[in-house]
Amino acid sequence: MNDCFICNKHAGKIETAGHVIYENDYVYVGHIDRNGNPNYLGHIMIDLKRHVPTLAEMTVDEAQAFGLTMAKVSRALKESEKAEHVYAFVSGDAVPHLHMHLVARYPNTPKEHWGPMDVYNWKDAPMGDNAQVSALCDKLKNYIENYHHE
């Protein structure tokens, strides 16, 4: 898949903000990258490693890994970063390679900015550059590796 952004990211052909938060044989977890624009801190991507377009094409093992990873990363956002809610969605319109967005909503987010993309419109949203994204990736990775609440 030479023209797939996610496949190229996994092959190391594209550099993105931050670094790996969690990875296994089936999934890769990293922070969203907005092409040099400030990133909403806590907008995480779970990518299926195998190139499939939607949830429907996953194998049982991939689905299990995807679901467990979604729970682990959501827990890390809530417990480590104090998110009060984690939005989760799969769109697939822009990039036809299965990936899930997890977006943290932090305390004191005004209700009019609730929603996975509405948080970006909040003037006091926690936005950060690559150094801040990398620091968040480190914190989430550390949490996932060291706190096992199965």
Image (cartoon, rainbow, N blue to C red):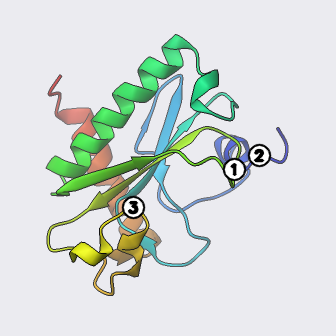
Q: Quadrant of the C terminus?
A: top left
Is 96 placed above or below 23 here? below
Find residue 78 and report its horizontal and vertical position in percent. Answer: 19, 50
Determine contact: label 1, label 3, CB under 8 Å. Answer: no
Tag 2 secondary structure: loop
Q: Which residue is mark 3?
A: 116
N-terminal-most mark, 2 or 1: 2
Quarter of the image for the N terminus: give it.
top right
CA separation, marks 2 and 1? Answer: 7 Å
2 and 1 marks in contact (CB < 8 Å): yes
Q: How many badges with numbers are in the image?
A: 3
- The residue mark sitting in front, 1 or 3, is 3
Residue 22 in picture, x, y percent from top left: 41, 38
| Amino acid type, label 3 | Pro
Q: Residue at x 30, y 34 (%)?
A: 71
Neighbourhood count class around disc 1 (C-alpha, 10 Å): few under 14, some 14–19, many 20 upward: few
Dot placed on the residue nearer the N-terminal end, 1 or 3: 1
**Amino acid type indicated by mark 1:** Val
Task: Identify which amino acid the numbered label 2 is placed on.
Answer: Cys
Where residue 133 sits: x, y (%)?
A: 40, 65
- Give the residue at mark 2: 4
